[in-house]
Amino acid sequence: MLRAFHSNWTRPFFVRNPGGIYAIEPFELLTTALSALAWRRENGPIRMICDTEAKRYYESLGLCFLWDEGVHSLLDAVPQDVNAMAFWAAGKLYALSAMPSPCVMIDTDFICWKPLALLVDGLDAAAIHREDIMPDIYPGPASFTQTHGFAFSAFDWSVQPLNTALSYFGSDTFRRYYTDTAIRFIRSSPSADDVLTYMVFAEQRLLAMCAEKKQACVAAFSDLPALFGGGQNGYFTHIWGFKQQMRDEPVLYDDFCRRCAARLQRDFPEAAERIAHVPSLAPYFHD
C-alpha cells in the first residue's frame, strides 16, 4: 500500500487575478477525479493538501469524497512572503514537507493506472522522468540574480532534473533534506523575476541535485518518448502538454471531457453518479 497526496495552493491564482472568483476548469476536475480514484483502486489511500479557499471550493462542488484520507487545509501556513507569482507550485513543496515518507506526490493532471509498489522497491526517491538541461528552462547559477544567501556551488549542475508530476519519497531523511533545501531557495528569492526558471529549479532541478549530493538511490519511472508516445505499457497519463491545445480547440476540449466522463462511468460508476451532479461537469455525462 502506498499513501499519496494531491495539492492545491490557490494563492498564485489570486495574485494573478486580484478579486477573482476561484474555479477549476472542467477537464482539470475530471482528471483530478480519475487521478484520485485510480490511485485508490490500484495503490492505496490519497489525501488532498490545500488551503482553505481550495477546500471550500471542493466542498461547494461535493467532490471531497474523492480523497479517502480527507481534504486538509495545511497550506494556509505557507508564509505570506513567499513569492506566489514566481513560485506558483511552492504549495507542492510545502505539502511534501508535511507528508511523512513513504509517500507519493501526484499532480491532479496525472493518472497512475497500475500498481506502483514494485517499481519503487528499495528506492529513496523516484520521479516520472528526467529532463534535458535546456538553458532557457534550466539556466546556470548566474541567472538567479534575485537569490541571495543560497549555496549554489554546493551542488552538481550536470545532473538531469527530475520531473515531479509523479514522485515517490521512500526515505524520510531525504524527503526532509530535499524540501528543506527547496524551501530555503524559495525563501532566499523573495524578488524572483521569472515565472519558470526559479520554480523548476526549486522543484525539479534541486530534487536531482539533492539526490546526487546525498548519494540517494533514485530512479525515473519513464521517459518523455515513452510517456507521450504510449511506450510505457499503460501505466501513466499526463495531461500537461495537452492543456493549451484543448483551450485553443473547443472540439478537442469537449471530446476529452466526454472521454473522461465515460471512463469514470465505466470504471467508477458510483463516483461518476456523484461527479455528474457538478454543474460544470454535468453536460459531459449526458448526450
Image (spheres, grey):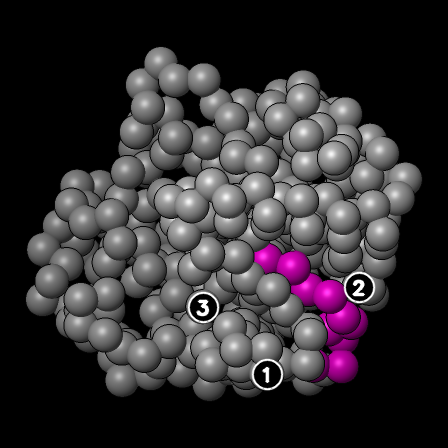
Q: Residue at x 76, y 40 (%)?
A: 66
Q: Quadrant of residue 171?
A: bottom right
N-terminal of the pair, mark 2 or mark 3, is: 2
Residue 271 pos. (x, y %)? 84, 39
Tell me the quarter of the image containing the C terminus: top right
Is 280 drawn above or below residue 272 in the view shown? above
Ranked by sequence position, the earlier of labels 2 and 1 is: 2
- Asked whether the viewer can see residue 214, the reply is no
Contact flag, marks 2 and 1 (Cβ < 8 Å): no
Is-magenta flag for residue 113? yes
**140 relative to 96, above or below:** below
- Per the rendered image, the range of residues in magenta is 110-119
Residue drawn at (55%, 62%) of the image: 238
Instruction: Judge left or right: residue 182 versus residue 253.
Output: left
What numbered label is drawn on residue 163?
A: 3
Instruction: Specify the label residue 43 is tagged with.
Output: 2
Q: Are marks 2 and 3 in contact (CB under 8 Å)?
A: no
Residue 142 vs residue 221, the one in the foreground: 221
- Magenta stretch holds residue 170: no
Question: Sequence order check: which comes first, mark 1 or mark 3?
Answer: 3
Residue 140 visible at all = yes
| Residue at the disc numbered 1 | 231
Query: Looking at the image, do the residues carrying marks 1 and 3 touch, with CB atoms under 8 Å apart?
Result: no
**Kind of residue at badge 3:** Asn
Q: Work out which quarter of the rendered image holds the N terminus and state it.
A: bottom right
Q: In what element is the residue under mark 1?
A: loop
Considering depth in this image, is 112 or 122 the residue closer to the camera? 112
Pick out the residue farthest to the top: 19
Could you tell me how far apart the alpha carbons at marks 2 and 3 are, in whole angstroms? Answer: 21 Å
Circle 3 SS class: strand
